[in-house]
């Protein structure tokens, strides 16, 4: 049988999007009252929940405390029902550890950690449903949660993935597109400065094409920023109305 | 951007595993009609015409667009491709269904859509907000799609009406499904069957012949009698195959006997590998190459393969009974030991019909429109077609496609597709042999050509990225005369340290053919350039094969362009030269070695490069330069260096056991005006031939090592398995009969013993032995390194080998170039390149295409040989016996490099006394003994008794055997009725 056509001659992707278009994004902040900050995000069918505690004193061994800045601790997990096949992942398996590490790198670059020396910030992210672009969804959820916790950041961290099919760069890959096995790139961007917080790539991609794919991912990340910004403003408006009451 | 767009989200759920996929609906998809205010400047240019006028349909005289459903597209593509049919809307729903059901039709639709003159428009209805429909409960996928098509048709009509009511522009729905059509009419959509509509196009009556005749709606064939048992539905077949009741296999009809076939069972089962199917009813409408399910019959019904030659001569349905008689006759010739597993076809898993070449057998009834068509391939049954132009098609080669085979019909139904021309005409016959060997040879489609670089092309800075400038090197190419697709060039120079630097520079075709685009797909499909006697079927468009990539030097190239534009300019002025120098720089992929004077490789490197070929020489010219004492220019010095190293390399290779085999290669000298062959010539080999070959081999081996090092799992390599010892029996026995010993335990000993097998009295013997040795060999094949363990190339005595040096004419080389480019970081990879299953598929296709190209080439030589002997008349020539068979000898005529069989048993003739000795091997005919390598004299003549299958026949002249041999001098007797008459007279 013919394989899936990722990009039709008319320029439409499997789910009807054009090359540069994002999936539908919906997000809410402050979904979890016990935490210092929390947020829930849906990017298409990828759903992620982020919870932030801190800044607080170092838990466990004090020796981990950093004299000049806060320690950022990130933990990633995915719900057993998040993917098509139900698979129980041992807590702290390789994939989760790697993801946690990437998130930590991303947020250490964005949070103004020097404002809270000798303290700790915990970011817990859980993916409830995975349909491509889990890293991006985690970063975006965590950004909202960190903002919700009132922890100062240099800028939003907005992430998006991009791929490359038939000479065209595709933004925000869905699971189907990821599964096709082409090159993928995940980008976390600080949109105001255009600084890159994290860039990760799977499979080989020629450096000539890197520029296009990178630009597609960056543009998508800026689009994510516009949307997240709107969510934050909406949340602030609602919160101030509540306070006003 | 995103904000302004409204997305509705629908999800699809199904299967045991929960799959949720997003499906976005949009409001920015254009209808494709120009001047539509509502769709405005929606993406892309409109493809439809604003006022389609040319289709004057008597059913629907107002302007309209056509909207066909899936089955119309799948079955009536021959009509849709006709230039008369334009302004067609292809729905995404339809296109996706076609894509899943038939890759060839899908490709044809895409080609048509890309042809701007056809005005085909693809409407993405599945993502359009107003035309998307959801599957309802209880509705199956087919019904849902039918509904989606009707919804889109209705939307179009309302939409076009809104655009301009007075235009009266409408969409006409074309479907052959009666229910669907009724529903459409109910919903107010004008709908016709394909047949109704095509017949209403009064200006184009010839289109009717091209309609596929589909018997689905019960087009009655006279006798309603059911001949065949029903085919089981696919689901039942699959169940049956799984549970072992049925076996799945490929149906191979017999060439000799139309009532017999073999089914090759798929899988690795040792038992029941081959099932015999005998008799019309058991064959049950399966056609050669179909994938079928068979049921094995109980042992008491097993049969033996019948030795009878049976050709279908029938014309009428009544013959069915007569055939049953013949079938019984087949079975009487049973020998208990010969019984084989026998089965009957219970159903068809996959049809593998293609358009067939052949000739019309005009019906005896004068006014009849229904005629039988006899395919050139004897394995294909006759096909019934309807045509009004039967008289015009008589004596022509035509193409016919099968549409279906109802249970009550003795023959399948089909439709006329194309007239190829008069039988025996050179163009016609060439077309036939290309079609019959499945060689893709249509002109390249617009879609393919659109990926060619725009002319005038020159090297830009971008092209120079990752590329070394080697224009200062004295590079030249050496090829046969008249070669335009030159893909290799060489250089050799002495380095400061005293070593030699040798470079092989191969046209950088993969720079122009990017993975996955239409150009790449087409080249991958073609797989190889096919060389026929006077025609070349290019794998890549000519702009690449002869211009941009060909490594010729400037002057040649210019002359070639002139020839092609048939402008005659005899003097090349300086300004021409200057103008051209801009084009002479070529992109290449270079393999560069540093060698010492003993031809030992010290260093190997690969790089993409730009070169400047200083000369394009023929083998003869290069040889002349090397031999000339007076020439000492750079090119000649370079050639001498190369020649010296090549000799050392060759010696080393032969010491390792590489084989020098021989096959009589024949070239035709064509008459420049009539293009008829006037003489044949066997190829002459010069030292320079082997010089070029030596470096090509070396480059291929070096590249093979490199890509296997980098991609152990997905390198594309070429191997040549060692033949099983039994293959050599013929050779060993034949040599023994001449008191020579051929050792076959290793390649080295074979090569050595062949070298020693000389006979002073019989110098041609060595060549004959080498020809025989060639026949013992296995076929060399492409394979993916991750799918195989044995890489050895027996013929070249190399542990690893691949093809790198001819990317203009072999697709394998393009893949190898891509792999090598990734390995050295000069180009990027793509997912398919590192997918070993995809690579294995590519190899499978390439092996098939190469085999077919070889067959087509042989068929072309055979046809030209026929032409040659047609004009030459009957000749007698000396020949050597290559093989002896039970009732024939196979001879080779060195003068023409022609091989033929002399039969000693003929129909309607008393059988001579034949004694065959397998050990010698020898054949004794009426007391005269024939051994392999014996010299005989044969008469060669053209037998055109069967117009569709003309062939060269040979008869024995010397030694004379009364009643067998023919006199050497006979006046131009009618060869269609051979000796018979004369023999009668003698009596
Ligand atoms: Zn419109």
Image (cartoon, coloured by chain):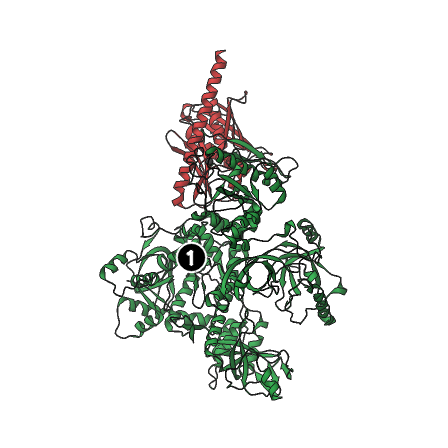
In this view, B8 is above or below A85? above
Q: Nearer the viewer, residue B974 or B53?
A: B53
Disc 1 marks which residue? B540
Label 1 C-beta lies within 8 Å of the nearest ligand 1 atom: no
**Which quarter of the rendering shows the C terminus of chain B?**
bottom right
The red-coloured chain is labelled: A
The reply to whether residue B661 is visible in this rendering is no
Q: Colour of chain B?
A: green
Give the percent coordinates (x, y) of residue B674: 40, 71
Q: Position of residue B331 (x, y in %)?
A: 73, 69
Q: How many marks?
A: 1
- Compared with residue A41, is residue B585 higher up or lower down, i.e. above or below? below
- In the rendered view, would you say B156 is above or below B376? above
- Nearer to the camera, B186 or A143: B186
Question: Disc 1 on helix, strand or loop?
Answer: loop
Q: Residue furthest left?
A: B574
Visible residue check, residue B424: yes
State whether residue B801 is above or below residue B190.
Answer: below
* The N terminus of chain B lies in quadrant: top left
Q: Name the quadrant containing residue B478.
A: bottom left
């Amino acid at each position: 049988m013919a394989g899936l056509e990722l990009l039709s001659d008319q320029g439409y992707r499997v789910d009807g999007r054009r090359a540069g278009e994002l999936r539908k994004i919906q997000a809410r902040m402050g979904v979890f009252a016990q935490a210092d900050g929390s947020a829930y995000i849906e990017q298409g069918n990828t759903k992620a929940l982020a919870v932030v505690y801190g800044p607080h004193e170092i838990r466990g061994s004090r020796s981990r405390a950093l004299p000049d800045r806060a320690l950022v601790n990130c933990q990633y997990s995915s719900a057993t029902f998040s993917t098509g096949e139900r698979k129980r992942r041992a807590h702290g398996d390789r994939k989760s550890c790697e993801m946690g590490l990437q998130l930590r790198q991303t947020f250490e670059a964005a949070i103004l950690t020097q404002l809270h020396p000798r303290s700790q910030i915990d970011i817990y992210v859980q993916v409830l449903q995975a349909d491509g672009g889990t890293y991006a969804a985690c970063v975006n959820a965590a950004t909202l949660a960190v903002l919700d916790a009132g922890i100062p950041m240099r800028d939003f961290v907005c992430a998006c993935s991009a791929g490359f099919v038939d000479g065209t760069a595709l933004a925000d890959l869905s699971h189907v597109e990821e599964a096709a096995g082409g090159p993928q790139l995940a980008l976390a961007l600080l949109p105001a400065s255009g600084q890159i917080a994290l860039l990760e790539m799977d499979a080989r991609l020629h450096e000539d094409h890197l520029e296009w794919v990178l630009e597609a991912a960056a543009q998508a990340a800026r689009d994510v920023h516009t949307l997240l910004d709107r969510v934050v403003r909406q949340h602030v408006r609602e919160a101030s109305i509540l306070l006003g009451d | 951007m995103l904000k302004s767009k409204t997305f509705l989200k629908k999800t699809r759920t199904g299967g045991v595993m929960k799959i949720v996929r997003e499906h976005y609906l949009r409001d920015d998809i254009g209808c494709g009609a120009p001047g539509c205010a509502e769709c405005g400047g929606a993406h892309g240019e409109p493809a439809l015409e604003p006022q389609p006028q040319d289709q004057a349909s008597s059913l629907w005289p107002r302007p309209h667009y056509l909207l066909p459903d899936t089955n119309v597209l799948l079955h009536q593509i021959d009509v849709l491709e006709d230039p008369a049919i334009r302004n067609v809307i292809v729905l995404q729903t339809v296109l996706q269904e076609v894509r899943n059901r038939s890759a060839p039709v899908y490709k044809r639709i895409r080609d048509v859509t890309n042809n701007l003159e056809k005005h085909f428009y693809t409407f993405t209805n599945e993502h359009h907000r107003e035309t998307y429909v959801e599957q309802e409960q209880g509705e199956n996928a087919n019904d849902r799609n039918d509904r989606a098509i009707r919804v889109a048709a209705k939307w179009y009509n309302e939409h076009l009406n809104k655009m301009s009511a007075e235009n009266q522009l409408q969409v006409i729905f074309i479907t052959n499904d009666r229910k669907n059509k009724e529903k459409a009419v109910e919903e107010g959509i004008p709908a016709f069957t394909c047949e109704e509509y095509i017949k209403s196009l009064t200006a184009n009556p010839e289109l009717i012949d091209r309609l596929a005749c589909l018997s689905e709606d019960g087009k009655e064939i006279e006798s309603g009698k059911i001949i065949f048992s029903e085919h089981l539905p696919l689901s039942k077949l699959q169940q049956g195959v799984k549970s072992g009741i049925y076996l799945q296999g490929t149906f191979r009809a017999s060439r000799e006997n139309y009532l017999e076939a073999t089914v090759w069972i798929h899988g690795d089962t040792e038992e029941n590998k081959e099932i015999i199917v005998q008799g019309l009813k058991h064959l049950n409408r399966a056609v050669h190459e179909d994938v079928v399910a068979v049921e094995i019959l109980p042992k008491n019904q097993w049969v033996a393969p019948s030795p009878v030659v049976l050709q279908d001569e029938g014309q009428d349905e009544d013959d069915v009974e007569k055939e049953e008689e013949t079938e019984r006759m087949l079975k009487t010739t049973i020998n208990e030991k010969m019984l084989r597993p026998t089965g009957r076809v219970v159903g068809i898993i996959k049809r593998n019909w293609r358009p067939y070449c052949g000739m019309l057998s005009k019906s005896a009834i004068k006014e009849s429109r229904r005629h039988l068509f006899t395919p050139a391939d004897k394995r294909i049954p006759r096909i019934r077609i309807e045509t009004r132009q039967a008289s015009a098609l008589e004596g022509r080669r035509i193409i016919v496609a099968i549409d279906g085979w109802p249970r009550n019909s003795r023959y399948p139904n089909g439709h006329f597709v194309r007239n190829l021309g008069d039988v025996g005409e050179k163009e016609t016959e060439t077309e036939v042999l290309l079609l019959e060997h499945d060689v893709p040879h249509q002109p390249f489609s617009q879609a393919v050509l659109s990926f060619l670089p725009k002319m005038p092309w020159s090297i830009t800075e971008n092209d120079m990225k990752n590329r070394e400038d080697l224009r200062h090197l004295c590079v030249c190419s050496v090829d046969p005369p008249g070669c335009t697709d030159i893909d290799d060039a060489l250089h050799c120079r002495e380095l400061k340290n005293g070593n030699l630097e040798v470079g092989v520079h191969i046209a950088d075709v993969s720079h122009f053919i990017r993975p996955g685009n239409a150009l790449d797909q087409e080249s991958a499909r073609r797989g190889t350039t096919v060389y026929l006697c006077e025609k070349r079927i290019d794998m890549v468009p000519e702009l690449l094969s002869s211009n941009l990539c060909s490594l010729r030097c400037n002057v040649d190239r210019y002359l070639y362009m002139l020839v092609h534009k048939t402008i005659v300019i005899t003097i090349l002025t300086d300004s021409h030269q200057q103008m051209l120098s801009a084009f002479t720089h070529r992109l290449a992929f270079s393999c560069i070695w540093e060698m010492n004077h003993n031809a030992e490789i010290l260093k190997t490197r690969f790089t993409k490069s730009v070169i400047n070929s200083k000369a394009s020489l023929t083998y003869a010219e290069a040889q002349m330069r090397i031999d000339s004492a007076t020439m000492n220019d750079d090119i000649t010095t370079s050639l001498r260096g190369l020649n010296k190293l090549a000799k050392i390399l060759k010696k080393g290779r032969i010491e390792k056991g590489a084989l020098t085999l021989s096959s009589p290669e024949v070239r035709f000298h064509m008459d420049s005006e009539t293009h008829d062959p006037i003489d044949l010539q066997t190829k002459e080999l010069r030292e320079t031939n082997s010089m070029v070959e030596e470096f090509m081999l070396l480059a291929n081996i070096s590249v093979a090592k490199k890509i296997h090092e980098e991609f152990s799992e997905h390198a594309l390599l070429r191997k040549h398995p060692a033949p099983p010892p039994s293959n050599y029996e013929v050779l060993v026995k034949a040599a023994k009969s001449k008191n020579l010993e051929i050792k076959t335990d290793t390649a080295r000993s074979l090569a050595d013993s062949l070298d020693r097998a000389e006979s002073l009295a019989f110098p041609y013997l060595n060549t004959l032995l080498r020809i025989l040795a060639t026949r013992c060999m296995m076929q060399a094949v492409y394979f993916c390194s991750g799918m195989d363990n044995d890489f050895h190339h027996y013929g070249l005595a190399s542990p690893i080998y691949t093809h790198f040096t001819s990317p203009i004419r072999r697709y394998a080389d393009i893949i190898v170039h891509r792999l090598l480019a990734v390995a050295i970081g000069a180009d990027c990879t793509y997912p398919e390149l590192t997918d070993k299953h995809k690579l294995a598929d590519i190899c499978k296709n390439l092996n098939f295409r190469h085999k077919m190209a070889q067959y087509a080439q042989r068929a072309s030589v055979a046809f030209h040989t026929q032409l040659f002997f047609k004009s030459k008349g009957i000749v007698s020539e000396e020949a050597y016996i290559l093989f002896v068979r039970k009732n024939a000898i196979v001879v080779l005529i060195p003068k023409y490099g022609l091989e033929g069989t002399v039969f000693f048993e003929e129909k309607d003739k008393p059988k001579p006394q034949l004694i065959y000795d397998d050990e010698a091997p020898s054949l004794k005919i009426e007391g005269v003994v024939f051994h392999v390598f014996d010299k005989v004299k044969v008469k060669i003549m053209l037998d055109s008794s069967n117009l569709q299958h003309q062939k060269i026949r040979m008869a024995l002249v010397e030694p004379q055997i009364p009643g067998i041999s023919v006199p050497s001098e006979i006046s131009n007797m009618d060869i269609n009725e051979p000796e018979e008459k004369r023999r009668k007279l003698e009596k």
